[in-house]
Image (cartoon, helix red, strand yellow):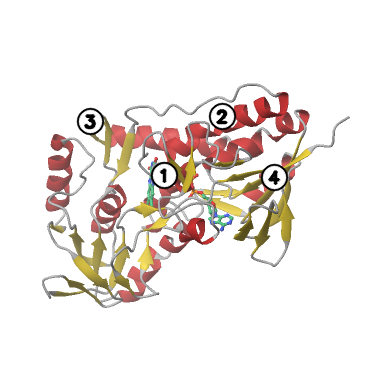
């Protein structure tokens, strides 16, 4: 009987949650499965709603330690801090070296602060655990009513501006975007509809505003304008964690992977989700890729233990995206097709509930 090969999963992102659930088949194929990750996972699909108090706290929390326990995966509850690629080992945040034969990395992304000066206490959309403090910050600024600024008009900035506009205790919402439009990836009609919805709720949307400094009490623009607020959220897009470059696993775009999700230079290293730089064509940082890469990663790990050809990840050209704009309003878009209304949000809640239920006891 050959020695089982040690498969070390770093981060319990979407793709790795699938591997945890399927750990039995990995073990049967000769993998000794280990996980290095925090004890819980926060799901972004409901993050804006929970941050603004529209859904109860914990609605998007998964018990990773419980899942690993149920499926017999050895879970080291800590974070990755360093990688020794030639030595096939990683260093954990509690000072332990873990060895591996096959390494897979799924550690997500962080809010981009590229070219910005940002106070350390400023809320960022990621990590999501930080964003969860939003409603609390608004409450602290009440009773006079909080003036809130959202920096960045992408999907998460739009969701947050929408939720904040109906949150009690918020006096005003200002949404700042450097580009010419908000929701740049949405079809034109959908963009117009979101602008109208935000305008109806008295959200002030300003485009073409290049922010250079994000401070706890104000933002500074390139034109020298100072805009005051009580609470600010940085929603300037998602980038690979700086840890990827610091550990030598990749660069600022993430861990470079081929279509097989294997590292460009190391067959025994995989990466999935937002932390991966998918070399066949850059992917938007949306959860759907992490979700769909899970089964490909699983098939690859099973195939490699049998010496079979490895499958490739083929991204969909257009993925369904549903924004939760607060106050019961949703907006669904896929390619040039879109619709806005309560039914879009109901669809989102069904998709989110089903996905979360797959990893709960
Ligand atoms: C407010 C908001 C709303 C969003 N809504 C949607 C949406 O509705 N639909 C959609 O498709 N996308 C959405 N996104 C984008 C989505 O969050 C990401 O694309 C998705 O989470 C990426 O999945 P992932 O599996 O790569 O990483 P993640 O889901 O971020 O998971 C990575 C995991 O790795 C862990 N980790 C991080 N660092 C380490 C470390 N050093 N060591 C060990 N573990 C580590 C983290 O704790 C985390 O649990 C949203 C983003 C934001 C900010």
Do labels 3 and 1 touch, CB within 8 Å? no
Do labels 3 and 4 touch, CB within 8 Å? no
Tell me the tag on residue 295. 2
Of the pair 196 and 291, the residue shown nearer to us: 291
Mark 3, residue position: 338
Front: mark 2 or 3: 2
**The quadrant where residue 347 appears:** top left
Asked if residue 352 can be seen in this view, the reply is no
Query: At x 80% / y 37%, what residue is drawn?
Result: 4
Asked if residue 95 can be seen in this view, the reply is yes
- Say if 132 sits above or below 62 in the image: below
Tell me the tag on residue 68. 4
Q: Secondary structure at mark 1?
A: helix
**The quadrant where residue 164 appears:** bottom left
Do labels 4 and 1 touch, CB within 8 Å? no
Mark 1, residue position: 45
Distance between the alpha carbons at the discs numbered 4 and 2: 18 Å
Q: Secondary structure at mark 2?
A: helix
Of the pair 40 and 266, the residue shown nearer to us: 266
**Crowding near the residue tagged with mark 3, few <14, some 14–19, many ≥20 C-alpha atoms within 10 Å:** some
Front: mark 4 or 2: 2
Is residue 359 rendered to the left or right of residue 165? right
Q: Is mark 1 within 8 Å of ligand 1?
A: yes
Distance between the alpha carbons at the discs numbered 2 and 3: 28 Å
Distance between the alpha carbons at the discs numbered 3 and 4: 38 Å
Tell me the tag on residue 18. none
Residue 59 horizontal/vertical position (percent): 49, 49
**Which image quarter holds the N terminus?**
top right
């Amino acid at each position: 009987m050959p020695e089982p090969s040690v498969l070390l999963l770093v981060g319990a992102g979407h793709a790795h949650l699938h591997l945890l659930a399927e750990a039995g088949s990995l073990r049967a194929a000769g993998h000794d499965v280990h996980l290095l990750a925090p004890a819980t996972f926060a799901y972004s699909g409901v993050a804006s709603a929970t941050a603004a108090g529209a859904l109860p706290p914990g609605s998007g929390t998964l018990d990773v330690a419980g899942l690993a326990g149920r499926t017999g995966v050895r879970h080291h509850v800590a974070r990755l801090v360093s990688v020794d690629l030639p030595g096939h080992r990683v260093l954990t945040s509690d000072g332990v070296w873990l060895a591996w034969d096959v390494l897979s990395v799924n550690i997500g992304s962080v809010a981009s602060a590229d070219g910005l000066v940002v106070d350390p206490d400023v809320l960022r959309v990621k990590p999501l655990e930080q964003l969860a403090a939003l409603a609390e910050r608004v409450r602290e600024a009440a009773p006079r009513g909080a003036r809130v600024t959202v920096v960045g008009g992408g999907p998460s900035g739009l969701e947050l501006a929408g939720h904040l506009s109906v949150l009690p205790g918020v006096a005003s919402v200002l949404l700042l975007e450097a580009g010419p439009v908000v929701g740049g990836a949405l079809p034109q009609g959908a963009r117009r509809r979101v602008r109208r919805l935000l305008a109806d709720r008295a959200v002030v949307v300003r485009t073409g505003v290049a922010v250079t400094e994000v401070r706890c009490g104000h933002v500074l623009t390139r034109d020298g304008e100072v805009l005051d607020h009580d609470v600010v959220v940085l929603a300037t897009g998602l980038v690979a964690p700086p840890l990827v470059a610091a550990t030598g696993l990749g660069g600022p775009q993430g861990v470079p992977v081929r279509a097989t999700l294997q590292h460009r230079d190391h067959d025994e290293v995989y990466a999935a989700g937002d932390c991966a730089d998918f070399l066949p064509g850059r992917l938007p940082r949306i959860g759907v890729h992490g979700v769909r890469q899970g089964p490909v990663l699983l098939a690859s790990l099973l195939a490699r233990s049998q010496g079979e050809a490895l499958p490739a990840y083929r991204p969909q050209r257009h993925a369904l995206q549903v924004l939760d704009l607060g106050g019961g309003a949703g907006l669904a878009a896929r390619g040039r097709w879109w619709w806005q209304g309560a039914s879009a949000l109901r669809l989102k809640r069904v998709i989110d509930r089903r996905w979360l239920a797959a990893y709960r006891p």
